[in-house]
Image (cartoon, rainbow, N blue to C red):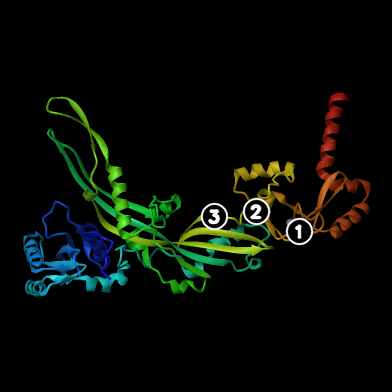
């Protein structure tokens, strides 16, 4: 099977750029189309001979490469200006003829032929048919320690009244590695007209994109906040998936939504669009003109493309057939909650917000001021907004308004966890004297007394 069959000569150069970057070469750049022939890619081999060695690459998407191509490259290397050692390399999908191999050996030109491309394809994640280079990385942004993976989950549980950590089942936990790409770009361009230089672009930028997205959108606000909180040079570590298998049921390493080539092109487009502006200038004839100054994709250089993951954790548990889940991005020292269905109210969810409207109005006001609080009803084993919780008139134990047994005593509504405690309360009230009974409904009694007092002041 011929390799990289679906790729044309121009794309082949891009594919080889990705391959070389993956193999650890630095400053891998495709020459501009207008550049001299015999110098398709230039890059730096810093692993070579202890000193940065420039490598000049000639790409040939052909079955065979003859001696003249090697000769031309050899002279291109000698005229290439670089302060340090330099060498040439022929990259081809096919093979070199014998005279070409002999010549290459003689002048020290490296051969990167189809055989070698096959050998490295797996290592760099390249599809040998269409040249798509998948993005592969083992880096993760400041990952949480395994023993702290569930901290955020239990922090939420701790906020639920009448629910303790020991009561909840171990959550089903998935750690997803969410792909992100950060790029350092540099854009240089001088715009000239007959009137001279009208605009100069000399800009560097750091761009971060969501690596999940196949549409290559920007970042979500969450990811943007997370990534900007860290120094990518020091805070991106190699992930050890094995250490998480103890604490997570599943580890899901998400695939990057685009190839190396696609992300590079998109980042360049985004930078080109950002830097495009319309410039006004005065011509020789003193007329004012305006011109749109748009850098080309070739004017944008990606100096560093850094793929990495951010840990995203999803923990869910079942309480009485209802599923409660928390989904958050996590680093070693912070979390960003994306979705929280633990702190939700069953009644509100079921559209029964007005179940107990008078106290609800007061609590709603309180909730609007602070964070809403949620509580766990031990009888129905569901989580509800705290305003739907009452206390048993006898034992003081919590109970939700739906599970509660209610009754009125001296005009006051009382809540009970069972008919037994209601009966117990009724017996206690019956045993009290008349005045003592009034204390059952203190608010009611005070209101009545106040009304009587006002009445007396006005009319007596
Ligand atoms: Zn209940």
Quarter containing ligand 1? bottom right
Left-right relation of 431 to 216: right
Give whichever of 182, 5 is nearer the camera: 5
Give whichever of 307, 114 is nearer the camera: 114
Q: Position of residue 290 (x, y in %)?
A: 22, 31
Dot 2 and dot 3 residues touching (CB under 8 Å):
no
Q: List the residue tagged with mark 2.
A: 374
* Badge 3 density bin: few <14, some 14–19, many ≥20, Cα 10 Å: few
Q: List the residue tagged with mark 3.
A: 339
- In which quarter of the view is residue 70 placed? bottom left
Relative to 22, does residue 342 appear above or below in the rendering?
above
Question: Looking at the image, which residue is at 27% across and 38% down?
Answer: 277
* Badge 2 density bin: few <14, some 14–19, many ≥20, Cα 10 Å: many
Question: Looking at the image, which residue is at 35% across and 66% down?
Answer: 136
Mark 3 or 1 closer to N-term? 3
C-alpha distance separating marks 3 and 1: 31 Å
C-alpha distance separating marks 2 and 1: 16 Å
Mark 2 or 1 closer to N-term? 2
Q: List the residue tagged with mark 1.
A: 397
Q: Position of residue 190 (x, y in %)?
A: 17, 42
Question: Looking at the image, which residue is at 28% across and 54% down?
Answer: 184
């Amino acid at each position: 099977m011929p390799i990289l069959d679906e790729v044309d000569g121009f794309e082949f150069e891009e594919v080889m750029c990705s391959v070389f970057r993956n193999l650890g070469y630095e400053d891998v750049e495709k020459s501009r189309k207008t550049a001299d022939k015999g110098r398709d890619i230039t890059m730096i081999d810093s692993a070579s001979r202890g000193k940065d060695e420039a490598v000049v690459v000639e790409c040939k998407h052909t079955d065979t490469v003859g001696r003249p191509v090697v000769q031309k490259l050899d002279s291109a290397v000698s005229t290439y200006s670089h302060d340090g050692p330099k060498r040439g390399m022929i990259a081809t999908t096919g093979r070199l003829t014998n005279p070409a191999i002999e010549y290459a050996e003689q002048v020290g030109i490296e051969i990167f032929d189809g055989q070698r491309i096959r050998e490295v394809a797996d290592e760099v994640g390249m599809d040998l048919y269409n040249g798509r280079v998948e993005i592969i990385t083992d880096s993760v942004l400041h990952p949480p320690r395994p023993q702290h993976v569930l901290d955020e989950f239990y922090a939420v549980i701790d906020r639920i009244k009448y629910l303790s950590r020991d009561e909840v089942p171990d959550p089903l936990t998935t750690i997803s590695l969410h792909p992100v790409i950060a790029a350092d770009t540099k854009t240089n361009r001088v715009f000239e007209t007959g009137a001279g230089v009208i605009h100069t672009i000399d800009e560097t930028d750091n761009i971060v994109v969501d690596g999940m997205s196949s549409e290559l959108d920007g970042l979500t606000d969450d990811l943007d906040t997370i990534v900007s909180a860290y120094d990518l040079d020091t805070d991106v570590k190699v992930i050890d998936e094995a250490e998480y298998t103890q604490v997570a049921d599943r580890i899901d390493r998400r695939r990057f939504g685009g190839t190396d080539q696609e992300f590079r092109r998109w980042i360049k487009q985004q930078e080109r669009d950002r830097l495009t502006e319309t410039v006004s200038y005065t011509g020789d004839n003193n007329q004012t003109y305006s011109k749109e100054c748009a850098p080309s994709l070739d004017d944008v250089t990606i100096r560093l493309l850094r793929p990495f993951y951010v840990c995203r954790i999803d923990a869910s548990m079942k309480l009485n057939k209802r599923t409660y889940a928390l989904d958050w991005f996590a680093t070693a020292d912070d979390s960003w909650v994306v979705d929280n269905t633990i702190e939700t109210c069953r009644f509100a969810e079921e559209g029964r917000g007005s179940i107990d409207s008078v106290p609800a109005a007061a609590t709603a006001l309180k909730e609007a001021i602070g964070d809403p609080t949620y509580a766990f009803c031990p009888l129905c084993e569901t989580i509800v907004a705290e305003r739907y919780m009452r206390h048993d008139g006898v034992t003081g134990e919590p109970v939700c308004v739906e599970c509660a047994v209610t009754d009125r005593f001296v005009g006051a509504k009382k809540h009970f966890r069972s008919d037994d405690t209601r009966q117990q309360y009724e017996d206690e009230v019956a045993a009290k004297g008349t005045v003592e009974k009034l204390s059952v409904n203190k608010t009611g009694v005070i209101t009545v007394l106040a009304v009587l007092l006002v009445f007396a002041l006005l009319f007596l």
